[in-house]
Image (cartoon, rainbow, N blue to C red):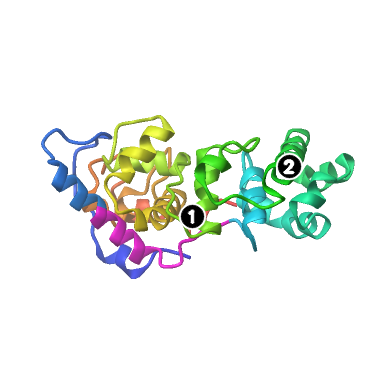
Amino acid sequence: MGLSAASRTLGAVPGPAVTSPSADETRTALVRRARRIDRILAVTYPDAKAELDFDNPFECLVVTVLSAQTTDKRVNAVRPKLFAAYPDAKAMAAADRATLEAIVGPLGFFRAKTDALLKLSAALVADHDGEVPAKLEALVKLPGVGRKTANVVLGNAFDLPGITVDTHFGRLARRFGFTAETDPVKVEHAVGELFPKRDWTMLSHHLIWHGRRVCHAKKPACGACPVAKLCPSFGAGPTDPIAAAALVRTEGPN
């Protein structure tokens, strides 16, 4: 999904290139600005969602674990064969290692990822009767599952509020001045305080989509950004609309 008309009509204006909350901005002003940014991004990316394919909580958990150090597109490509062979935790826990390695091989780090899937599936069988728990505290106790993965599962598989602090979310949270924190857990808590819980999951999608398409790490497309007027880091990338437009991706990285 490309940028909507909203991103073309909201022009960019010069602003200071800072990456932390302004000392002059009150807490109330920050909350209002943060929520306005999210509303604009919601209009810009009406189809924002998890870009990993899955049909149930087990698949969501597995593909999220597999997505480390590779692309969503590659994970989606191996998903049909993976779950045709191992449709649930019990089947995956009993998988032949060599066969499982061959399936996940295209993703890189296949030995480590195979080991992670076997341990994760075994833990689900032993501790949860093969079902994925719907609580953060239980999810993070599973082998290879941190808060980021747990929040992806909670928000997307169970429709429970969760903030997914990946590299894109953390970068944009700092550029937008939502927080100056760099630790993912501290970012999660700081940003969560600015939004009602019901918005957490979609907020994550909005920032991640924007980070993948416009607000790039090395050269953000500031001159084509729909929230430029609200961003204290405007000017971190090209501000000329034509130059910036050339940097915009119509979809996330492959």
**Residue at 78% over, 34% down:** 111
Label 2's element?
Answer: helix
For residue 146, side relative to residue 56 (left or right):
left
Q: Which residues are magenta?
A: 35-51
At label 1, the amino acid type is Gly
Of residue 105 and residue 239, the one placed in the foreground of this image is 105
Marks 1, 2: nearer the viewer: 2
Q: Earlier in the sequence, mark 1 or mark 2?
A: 2
At label 2, the amino acid type is Ala
Q: Position of residue 89 (x, y in %)?
A: 75, 50
**Residue at 63% over, 49% down:** 61
**Residue at 46% over, 46% down:** 164
* Residue 50 makes an appearance in the image: no
Q: Which residue is mark 2?
A: 126
Q: Which residue is mark 1?
A: 155
| Disc on res. 240 | none
Task: Report the residue that reaches farthest toward the bottom.
Answer: 5
**Residue at 19% over, 45% down:** 30
Label 1's element?
Answer: helix
For residue 89, side relative to residue 26 (left or right):
right
Q: Position of residue 95 (x, y in %)?
A: 85, 46
For residue 99, side relative to residue 249 (left or right):
right
* Residue 181 makes an appearance in the image: yes
Magenta span contains residue 44: yes
